[in-house]
Amino acid sequence: MATKFFSFLGTGKYVKCNYALDGIKIDKICYVQEALIDIFLKKGIKIDGIYIFKTKEATTANWISNAKYPNESGLFGVLKKYEGIVNTIEAVDIPSGEIEEELWDIFDKVLGKINYKDEIIFDITHSFRSLPVLALIILNYAKFVKKCEIKGMYYGAVEALGVPANEIEKKLKLEDRNAPIFNLTPFVNLLDWTVGIDRFIEDGDSRYINKLIEYGKGELLKKGMKDDKNILEKVGKSIQNYTNNVAVCRGKLVSSDGIELKEKIDFAFNISEKSYIKPMTPLIENIKNYFDNFTDDEDKNMIQVVKWCRDHNMIQQGLTILEEGIITYFCNKFGVDKCNQKIRDAIGQAFYIKMNNPPKEKWKNEAKLYEDIVNKVLESENSDKFAKLIYNIKDFRNDINHAGWRDNSKPYKTFVKKLNTFIDDVEKIIE
């Protein structure tokens, strides 16, 4: 793993300016690359490699010579001062990027300088035409393919001086040419948040978004927003608890997890509105929409959890939670201990009795022990519908749990279709 500084060299006549970033100012600099590297070194950031991507035109204008100041060194000479400090200083020739094939060549050459788990700092100040967009695409691609990390993307904003580039020397003294360097990293991170939230909403996978929350906590702490950092930490924990407990069918917890996540998401709105992650608000809205239907009604929450399973292709979990949720519904209905396994077994046996009507002497022990509960189930409204539902759900659940090693095992599409039907049937009765 190495920290690498990437930059595109341009062809312009770059006037000397004073560049500033994070309270650090570098005076009388012609090339923004030098200003950025000096700033990072002053901040104690170790740079292992400097890679300058240059076209033939940029090589002529600003690599060996200096287009603005012919008597001064180009960027090649400027970078010599980092020899012995930085392990690698390399110029990479690229085409101008005027046709699609050349853009792909640039893509390959930039990507080729990124190794597994590298940390990349990218200066896009003098990127030509579509190169800033291409750089962003390359970096996001490399994050997934090479697991690299984007440590920063920066832009030296000479235009912020408010004077046309060709008139800066005429109208501004050197001490007045104070150009800010914009940190574009939060906008890069916004793409990460978009991917993370999309994974969570579309796939039910919270791992990526929780990594981003860890990063977000650090950023809030840097801003002195300790209370907000703690809230964001709780949001991350709630997301993790919910998805983990659904994945392993923790029926005792998923309802309360959903309610807690619903509450925590509301707090996340306030954080996103006043921090660097403000553009996340519409993305958080997508999560909020999913959990707004959670209430204090455990039985209705069970249906929401099963819908989550269906929407995220967790068919096995959906069938399991639905079957056990029906039994929990009857425990709640009759005010009995829903955590008592023998009572739950007795309710399950009641449905078998409803379907098959065996003589009482053939009832199983749990049904005999809790005969009063069994009778309440048998006499309850819609008991026949629930009995049929439980019977069918159990059949599909067993087919999955036995990995299809049975006669007449069912195909995937049938499971999806039937889970939808089961949800609709249960929802109609419970609602």
Image (cartoon, rainbow, N blue to C red):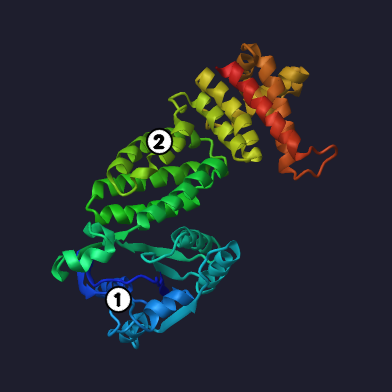
Expressed as whole percent of the image width and height from the top left, the position of residue 345 reads: 63, 29
The vertical placement of 39 against 308, above or below, is below
Mark sitting on residue 11: none
Expressed as whole percent of the image width and height from the top left, the position of residue 308 reads: 56, 35
Q: Residue at x 48, y 52 (%)?
A: 208
How far is the residue under mark 2 from the one under mark 1?
Answer: 61 Å
| Depth check, front residue: 35 or 74 | 74
Q: Is residue 158 left or right of residue 76?
A: left
| Depth check, front residue: 49 or 247 | 49
Mark sitting on residue 260: 2
Q: Which residue is mark 1?
A: 68
Q: Residues within 10 Å of mark 1 (few under 14, many from 20)?
A: some
Q: Residue at x 40, y 47 (%)?
A: 236
Expressed as whole percent of the image width and height from the top left, the position of residue 137 reads: 50, 59
The vertical placement of 232 against 298, above or below, is below
Q: Is residue 208 left or right of residue 321?
A: left
Q: Mark 1 falls on what kind of element?
A: loop
Q: Amino acid at mark 1?
A: Lys
Q: Amino acid at mark 2?
A: Glu
The vertical placement of 5 against 319, above or below, is below
